[in-house]
Amino acid sequence: MSAKSTEDNKGNNDRGGAKIPALMWAFSAVFALGTGVGGYILGENHGYDRAVDALAAGELPESDSSAPVTEIPEDAKPGTDFAEAKASEEAAMIHGPGSPINSRQEISNSARRDPNDPFAVGAVDAPVVIAEFTDWDCPFCIRHATETEPELLKEYVEPGYVRIEWNDMPINGETSQAAARAGRAAAEQGKFAEYKKAYFDEARGTDGHPGFGFEDFVRFAETAEVPDIDKFREDAASDKYDKAIAEALDYAQGLGISGTPGFIVNSEFIGGALPIDDFRKVINGELQKTVKN
């Protein structure tokens, strides 16, 4: 859903969210070519071949071949608007990009930059936005959330250089769907970040898919101090979020993303639970672009 403002969000909910066309080549493969740090390939080698063909035909922009930027550029200006999202049912329905994405050149439109987005952390006006595509039941997502993300928060989010926006991508069946509903139920009461932490703190101790059940979700909500647990139970067990979750999944798959976690970093893509150094290279490179402009 477009999220430039609460009013824009409402309008896009009425339209079923900002539309993402099915692209002729997998964006994930295209992003991997652009960043050189990996990525998921839709249709395996077939998707890769089509992306290479598109690049050779001049349909896609050549990637910047300059050396990686190893540190935050001195002249990079951090964002300063750390407004907190207001808890509401409408906010818990937020999904999708900030505005429609019709081509590779428009991929930065994935940034919502909505001050009322409960699934986001960091300054609304941060120069870099990471659109994260995640499945609650994915072991690699758990690894990212517990190993790499804390470093990203400390180095980039807290100082105002990066904003991270969560996107549901439940691809592991009903367990993932149920977990996504519970996450949105916590978001509706303004406790998404706290719930996410409680969930992943326990999930990191599991082997493979955690496969948490409903009472686990309630326990995480209690740890996160969700104000009204009875409401959380009712909302998490209902189908009220199903349309938003389905459209969030359609959004990710419409981009050609076929695995989790995946990350659109302004105009670049990172696929998989990669080490912090891979994120630094891409983030610092995006920050350098803001200095040049």
Image (tube, rainbow, N blue to C red):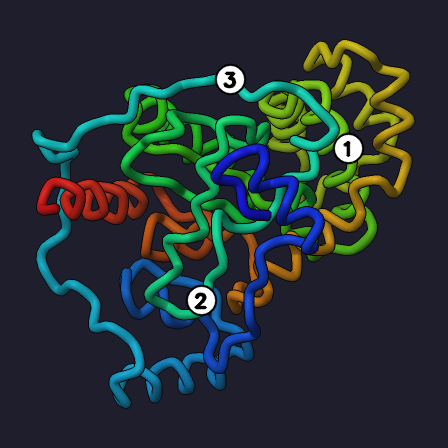
The residue lying toward the viewer, choosing from 207 and 237, is 237
CA–CA distance in space, label 1 to label 2? 28 Å
Q: Secondary structure at mark 1?
A: helix
Q: Left or right: 193 with respect to 14? A: left
Discs 1, 2 touching: Cβ within 8 Å: no
Q: Regarding mark 2 in the picture, which secondary structure is present there?
A: helix
Dot 3 or dot 2, earlier in sequence: 2
State left or right for residue 181 relative to residue 287. right
Q: Is residue 5 positioned above or below 23 on the image?
A: above
Residue at 8%, 30% in the rendered image: 74
Residue 28: mark: 2
Whole-angstrom CA distance, mark 3 to mark 2, is 32 Å
Residue 111 in the image: x percent, y percent?
A: 43, 45
Q: Is residue 30 left or right of residue 136?
A: left
Which numbered disc flags the more N-terminal residue, 3 or 1?
3
Amino acid under label 2?
Answer: Ser
Discs 3/2, front: 3
Instruction: Check if mark 3's residue and mark 2's residue have beta carbons within 8 Å.
Output: no
Tell me if residue 81 comes above or below residue 204 in the rendering. above
Q: Residue at x 88, y 24 (%)?
A: 233
* Alpha carbon separation for disc pair 3 and 1: 21 Å
**Amino acid type of the residue tagged 3 in the rendering:** Glu
* Residue for badge 3: 84
In the picture of the structure, the residue carrying the numbered disc 1 is 182
Could you tell which of marks 1 and 2 lies nearer the N-terminus? 2
Instruction: Identify the residue at horizontal 69%, vertical 38% (top origin).
Output: 93
x then y, percent, for residue 224: 68, 14
Mark 3 closeness class: few <14, some 14–19, many ≥20 residues within 10 Å? some
289 vs 37, nearest the viewer? 289
